[in-house]
Image (tube, grey):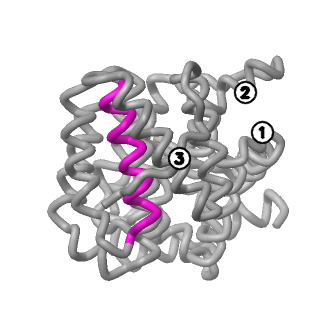
Amino acid sequence: MATNEKLRAQGQIFHQLRKQRNYSIASLGEKSTISRFERGQGSLHLEDALDIFNKINLCPADFYGFLHPDQPSAIKTLAQEVFDAFTTLDLKKLLALQKKAEASDDALLALGLKILLTDPVISEQLEAKGLPVPVITTKEEYTISDYVFQIDYWDYYNLFLFDLFCMKLSDKMLEYCMNYFSRRVSEYHHNAEHSHILLLSLSRTVFYMLDKGDQERARDFLDKLSLFTTEDDLFYRVVQRYLEGYYDYSFVDKAAGRLKMAGALGVLRDFGSEKIVRILDYHFKTRCSDVDTAAGASSIA
């Protein structure tokens, strides 16, 4: 869709939603900006859009859903592409996805993929190849925190954004989200797709706490993560064992922690989980380089 057509579509949808909610342009402030936006003659900056959406009680996910009726399937496809590129350290693919998001009309998604490129594992790869690592501004960090705090319905789209945002959310905001999810464990157990992406993002959040050396939050988040892994979630139970090993390595007993991490990698290799093994193997070698990752598989019971 050409840029002018995108702007017209956005403006028309917003106009309809505003009228349905009985809000006048004057009541929202920024009259000229909103008028131009509704006529397809101008766009809204991300911060302005979130502020205006909040004023008319409009969830951004709903707005983009009206623009793209096939959004759920499109977002799920994109999430899988991002997961594949991230776990295989495919920088070319990640950069292409981020560029594609920037060209779309979803500024939140574009910001999320920009944040993903600052992940320690990815940024190390970018620097090794002489490529620039994106810089996330304080204003952008406030933007994502405000957005996450205002979420009242955690659909797949918002869970995917949380997965992308989590590294740049404040510790307090992560605690807020962890506590929120923990109170609704049973809901996620009955939705396999939501449970899958939530477990991914919660696992990544634990990694960040451990990399930061925040023992108290790392322990708390690990305990909360265990609430989401059922007997059937063998894959995530092994990932959690790896995280427990990383916790032990960081704070308790380096030798025992390394052994537990290597054992979890062995189990994942036996499962044939090559993608996740590759990213964890890279993590292991850069954090615990003095240990052989080919250690035998250990029991996770």
Q: Report the Cα–Cα distance between label 1 and label 3.
A: 31 Å
Residue nearest the viewer, comparing 214 with 277: 277
Amino acid carrying mark 3 in the image: Gly
Q: Toward which corner of the image does residue 181 lie, by quadrant?
A: bottom left
Q: Which mark is residue 296?
A: 3
Q: Say left or right for 273 vs 197.
A: right
Residue type, label 1: Leu
Q: Position of residue 195 (x, y in %)?
A: 39, 69
- State which tag comes first along the sequence, 3 or 2: 2
Question: Which residue in the protein does label 1 denote?
Answer: 91
Which span is picked out in magenta?
Answer: 233-249
Q: Is residue 232 magenta?
A: no
Dominant secondary-structure state across the stretch colored magenta = helix
Q: What element carries label 3?
A: loop
Tell me how far mark 1 sits from mark 2, CA to CA. 8 Å
Question: In the picture shown, does residue 133 fall above or below 147?
Answer: above
Decide if residue 36 is in sight here. Answer: no
